[in-house]
Amino acid sequence: MLRFSVHVCMLWLFYTGTFSDEDINGCEQQPCQNGGVCENHNGGFRCLCSKQSQNGRLYGGETCTTALSGCDDNQCENGGICTPLLVDGQHTYTCICLPGFTGPKCQTPTVFSFESRGYMYIETQLLEPEAPLNVTFSFRTARPVGTLLQRRVDDLLLSIELMDGHLCLRSLRGQGSSTLVQELPEYLSNNRWHTVEASLGGVVSLIRLLCTEGNCTRDSSAKVQLLEQASRLPEPGTVRQSLSIGAVRGNGGLGRAVDEGDYPPAFLGCLRDVFVDSHLVLPVVVPGDSDAQANITVGCSDKDKCDDSPCQNRGRCVSQGWRSYTCECYRPHEGNNCEEEYITARFGNKDLESYASFSLDDDPGDTVTVSMFIRTRQSSGLLLILANSTSRYLHLWLEEGRVRLQVNNFETLVSRVAVSDGHFHLVTVKLEGTEAILFQSAQSQGSVHIRPIQVHPRDLVFVGGLPDSRASASFGGYFKGCVQDLRINSKLLQFYPIPTPVESYTLEQLINVTQGCSGDNACAVNPCLNGGVCYSMWDDFICNCPPNTAGQRCEEVKWCELSPCPTTAVCRPRSQGFECLSNVTFRVESSILHYRSNGKIKRSLGSVSLSLRTRQSTATLLYAQKDSDFLTVFLLDSHLIMELQAGADEDSRKVTVQSQGPVSDGAWHTVELSMENQTLQASRWIMAVDGNKEERSVSKTVSGDLDFLREGADIFLGGLGLDARVSLSGCLGPVEIGGLPLPFHLDTDLNLPRPQEEQFSRINSNTVPRYGCWGASICVPNPCQNKGTCEDLFDLHHCSCPSDWTGPLCQEPTDTCISSPCIYGNCTNLPEGFKCECELGYGGEQCEVELDMCENSNCGDGATCLKGFQSYSCLCPQNLTGQYCDEKIPEIPWYIETSPLPQLPASTCMGTRWNYSCFNGGNCSEADNSCYCLPGFTGQWCEKDVDECASDPCMNGGFCLNYVNSFECVCDMNYSGIYCQIDVSDFYLYLFLGLWQNLFQLVSYLVIRLDDEPEIEWGFHVND
């Protein structure tokens, strides 16, 4: 806001009354208080009270002693400055208003603004037309152009305008051209307040800039007179002069001239304190039907219009400076605030044939872009055709829910995504030179190379179909759905125009095309079945199905949720119905089950499926016959066989198919029998057991199908007929012929009857099958002996025997040695188990422990224990002997000379269980852990020297010396001989004499022999 520095000089003149002649200078006594200034006046004095507050107060009165209280309640509004007064002894006040406000209390705003093109017409009829009109106003704007004021006198139009930010005065007379009268040099479009004075009319017209915000002053002492507002615009030609603030379209100044676009340019900004010949112009609210003013807003706001989100329908607001904006609208919306929507056209309403046609009135150019919003649930239909007088050169239609484009009746392009989902989709076709591109919701769907096309004026555009229905049928027929915002390049093809004028092509025909996009009432024909409630959607419907029903139209009844089957069966849904599945047991005492069709079977019967469980090697499972045609499924040698003879064709012969392997093993097996080619009258038949298609069996000959069973044929399960006995001992599971089951339950057994139309029915109602699969009671009584447990394997038992019994019936004792429990020994069966006789060197209950014979040996100190398989031996040192080396060898008397014993080597041998040694020159033996000993040694390892003195061979007190494999007796002097057995005591003398002689001879002999004989060495050889 501009601020005015207003200097108000207020003088309060107070007189002291009658002065005496003696009072020449009344101010000598300083009568004025509170800062008042005393003046001599007419022989007396008067006080000029201070305008500065004293102790927060202003004072008045004769001597400035009366505190002024007129502003105690702060009566001024809108920032006005209150000044207290004392008039005739009464306290009052006056308000000094800020710029933009007036009134006794500054309560009336004088500011108004144009936020869009607008004007205010001012009544000036009471003024003299030839007299100059004086106008003073303040304005504020940021826009460089705009018309602030216009005055017309007869055919002369004077206007004050902003041009490039400079204020200009222009004149226009009649229909001539506008003339620039005056231009102010200052740039005023700077969003600050500027005060301007203008004189319009008379001899000279001029404008003058009085001040700019911050340096303006305002005289608020004069009383403001208000200008009377006009109620409405005068009719053209009825007045000589007019005055308007703002821009009036045309050059007439009254707003009723011919529209000339955006001339004169509108002023967008604020005005305040507008005076016309000293009369203040106030913004007022006029009646809604008054045209005296337009688009005037009281006050002046800097707020960005985009902050209020004026753009509707997701339009993007773009600020255009002071209180101005534009909206960038998204298709299909239009208008200043995107408030308008292009009107949607409905095609095919109530399935009527509808179409529209437009003619082109210009040349779209080399690049042609056709775009539109479409909405449909129809998978096919013609969308658009471009045609000239000779051919149709562009086709756009729906095929299988996708957009298809064809150019020049040849090049074709198909979108990747379907659009028939009931939602709006933007479809765009761009033809640019030799390329055609298809877009869908701004996503490229592909492009195709084309021959260039040229769109000319007077070409036709057909939408939704063609006048010729047969021609439309070639492209999916007439379109059913909605089209909106159809345009070629940026030019509209409007089926129903919107209020805002937009450039559009000419509509030629509109046949059965309605406004809006309402869908057909699909619930009118009540499409929901089984009590479903229909809810209409756009060109569609949805059914709220009751419990136990499903499907789009509630056509699928969830029969099994209604518990239609007895407890002995399991419900399985089937097409248009259900079936109760169970197994049945056939025994000798059972009855054969008899079936016939209900006469309503229309399908071709080309297959048989069944499940069976039996241990019987020969039996009839299924037999059916009509006249010469028959079907038999039976067991032979545990193999499943089918025999079929059907068809009147001469090529049809008896067919036989046999399973690859046996099926009579007591386990469940599924069998599938089907024609190899069901489209032929006669074909080979295939058998697959347990779904194994790799080992399936194929007949060698061909035969017809099973259509002879559709009416009048008898079908039997379990035997060849009602007169025959049941030949099957086992169980049958579900049996189907051509996908239709042979039910084991009668309709009377069910809680609900089977609703399906095509059925086989059981007709022997007096027969009650045994439901479930039950084997023979082979475990009652228990055939297993010796407390064996019987296991039922379906018509076969198995005995689980205790550990000490074996055999099929646990009748034989268990051979406890059959598992060879003795590891290093021989097993012997015992009543309570087994006994192991261990090999040498092993022990333990199962001979699993290797024994160490030396672990508790009795060998004496210094002896070495030698380990054998069964026993051990002690290797004694030289001074000990005996079995355990616990006996000392007697000492040889000193007088007896002995020969040293030889040092014999020891041999190391490889045993099967460990290595061992052969001592005293012994050699390794072939027998494990044994040796070959030299003479004189014994023991398993030759570890003992044979004591030849043990037998005490020396007689008569002779001393025995033990040698290797020999001994020597040292006799007493009186005896002699090998064993000291000769008494030589009588011949002592002779012996003594002869001794010397013999001794001499002996020495001589030995000397001679030693020189002649080789030396003797004791040597031992060890065999490795």
Image (cartoon, rainbow, N blue to C red):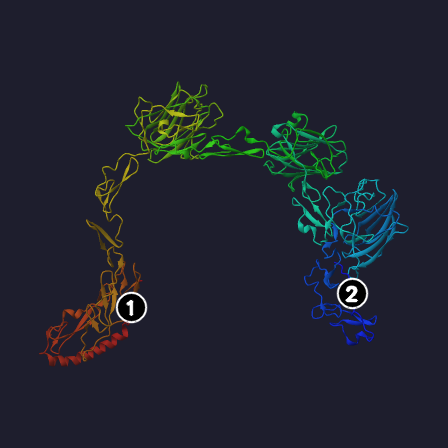
Disc number placed over residue 10 in the picture, else none? 2
Q: Amino acid at mark 2?
A: Met
Q: Is residue 417 left or right of residue 208?
A: left
Q: Report which quarter residue 467 is drawn in.
A: top right
Q: Residues within 10 Å of mark 1 (few under 14, many from 20)?
A: some
The answer to whether residue 927 is visible is no
Q: Report which quarter residue 645 is drawn in.
A: top left
In the depicted view, which residue is nearer to us: 470 or 821?
Answer: 470
Query: x and y percent of residue 757 in the render?
Result: 44, 25
Query: x and y percent of residue 887 in the render?
Result: 18, 72
Q: Is residue 446 left or right of residue 816?
A: right
Query: x and y percent of residue 1018 in the render?
Result: 27, 70
In the depicted view, which residue is nearer to us: 931 or 1005?
Answer: 931
| Secondary structure found at label 1 | loop
The answer to whether residue 834 is visible is yes
Q: Residues within 10 Å of mark 2 (few under 14, many from 20)?
A: few
| Secondary structure found at label 2 | loop
Residue farthest toward the left in the current orientation of the protein = 986
Among numbered discs 2 and 1, the one appearing first in the sequence? 2
Query: How far separated are the C-alphas under marks 2 and 1?
Result: 157 Å
Disc number placed over residue 916 in the picture, else none? none
In this figure, which residue is indicated by the disc labeled 1? 905
In the depicted view, which residue is nearer to us: 299 or 222?
Answer: 222
Image quadrant where one finds the N terminus: bottom right
Above or below, comparing residue 667 to residue 49 in the picture: above
Image quadrant where one finds the C terminus: bottom left
Q: Is residue 882 left or right of residue 745?
A: left
